[in-house]
Image (cartoon, rainbow, N blue to C red):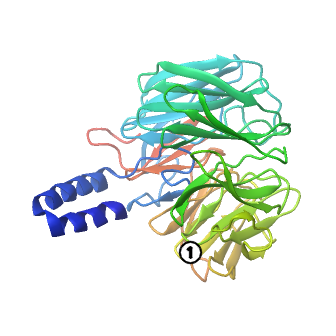
Amino acid sequence: MRRFLLRVSHFKALAPTAAGLLALICAASLARGEDWPCWRGPRGDGSSHEAGIPTRWSGSENIAWKTAIPGLGHASPIVWHDRVFLISCIGDTTERVLVCLDRNTGRTLWQRTVFKAPLEKKHSLNSFASSTPATDGQRVYVSFLDVNKMMIAAYDFAGRQLWLEHPGVFSSVHGYCSSPIVYEDTLIINGDHDGDAYLVALDRATGKEIWKTPRENKTRSYCTPIIRTIDGQPQMILSGSKSVGAYDPRTGAPIWTMDGPTEQFVASMVDNGKLVFLTAGFPEHHILALRPNGRGNVTDSAVVWRTTENTSYVPSPVVIGDYFLVVADNGIASCYAAADGQRQWKQRIGRHYSASLISAGGLAYFLSDDGVTKIIKPGPHFDLVAENELGESCYASPAASDGHLFIRADHHLYCIGPAAEGQAAR
């Protein structure tokens, strides 16, 4: 939105008519709100720029709709305009499915079986449908494990399969969870696993390989990259496989790398425009703030601050203004000053957490495995704004779009907020 406003200001000086047209486009965009097109939303960091995302609900109050979802899965829903997409696994038939819902009513528009295959070995907290889909507004992309190979498929919005590819092998005793991201004309997927690990980019239109970069340490991790422009150059940044690193998303060429700080990673990284932050992992536990503008091996120069207390392994963190917020898997939340790592507070807020944090309206949303969302205002003191109990277990991370919050529970997808005009809340 800031880019739109800058463009409006520029056109105002040169062409009043064009400025007025752009202002109308900008207003229309604001009225419709943001889409949530992939893992952790439009910026890949769990942030929503919308105002008015709900802060109060229960299993029966402030629910626009609630739809039963076939099978089980921990992948988040994604939202594009009037469509919601999510994946699931139907255990009895071993079908991995893609489901498309009407965003206003929750009605199932179509369901497609992507493939059938034996169920893989996995961790008890993982699922057989844990990779959040991605969309570019034309196609929706899904990712599963097909026995011992990564499988990526593309569908149009009518539910027609456009292509299906197996870009590489994948082996992990913990199962599979690689969420694709869209960048320019490519689809990028992290193939960190216990073998010849890799990062790979596919052509969005055809599924054909554009580039493939080996990951030297060949160790399982589950981190979806974020892409940022730093000093004029796009960087694809991720932790995983005994390292933290940045790559050119157009070519897969490495830009910088840091050794460690541990072996395995799950949580995605976040940034505040100056530093990038990670929380990890196994077997050692770390939170790090790093300078992202180095070259080559930056192990001895990149770290700005570090802590090993109450870190998260699975839930990804958020940055809100001057603060970095995280919840450990065991339910201890912490708030740090992003600039120097000074802890502002720590507080036990629940029993166990798998879902990643999201932020909206200057608030952090913490969703526990028990289906309880605690909404907290960041600052020097613990400030609980609201506590909302859904009444159903939740392991998927929420999505926020156009004034609503979408939460996938064990058996239902909930759209939280006001019902669409002409639709009674249910």
Q: Which quadrant, please, contains the N terminus? A: bottom left
Q: Is residue 232 above or below residue 380?
A: above
On screen, 371 above or below 386?
Answer: above
Observer able to see residue 274: yes
Quarter location, residue 108: top left
Percent x, y of residue 253: 66, 49
Mark 1 closeness class: few <14, some 14–19, many ≥20 residues within 10 Å: many
Question: In this rendering, does residue 132 appear at all?
Answer: no
Q: Does dot 1 land on a helix, a strand or a loop?
A: loop
Label 1 sits on residue: 378
Quarter residue 103 falls in? top left
208 or 420, which lies in front? 208
Instruction: Tell which of 225 and 411 is nearer to you.
Output: 225
Q: Residue at the location (73% across, 69% down)?
A: 288
Q: Quadrant of residue 297?
A: bottom right
Q: Which of 275 and 85 lies nearest the eye of the viewer?
A: 275
Side of 386 relative to 121 (left or right):
left
Residue 312 image point, x, y percent: 74, 61
Name the outermost residue toward the left.
Answer: 17
Residue at image point 45% right, 41% down = 79
Q: Indicate the amino acid at tag 1.
A: Pro
| Residue 362 rendering spot, x and y as whole percentages | 48, 69
Residue located at (67% from left, 82% from top): 340
Residue 144 x, y percent position in the rendering: 67, 30
Residue pushed farthest right? 283
The quadrant of the picture occupied by the C terminus is: top left
Q: Is residue 18 left or right of residue 424?
A: left
Q: Give the side of residue 347 with respect to residue 320, left or right.
A: right
Q: Which residue occupies the foreground of this view, 70 or 402?
A: 402
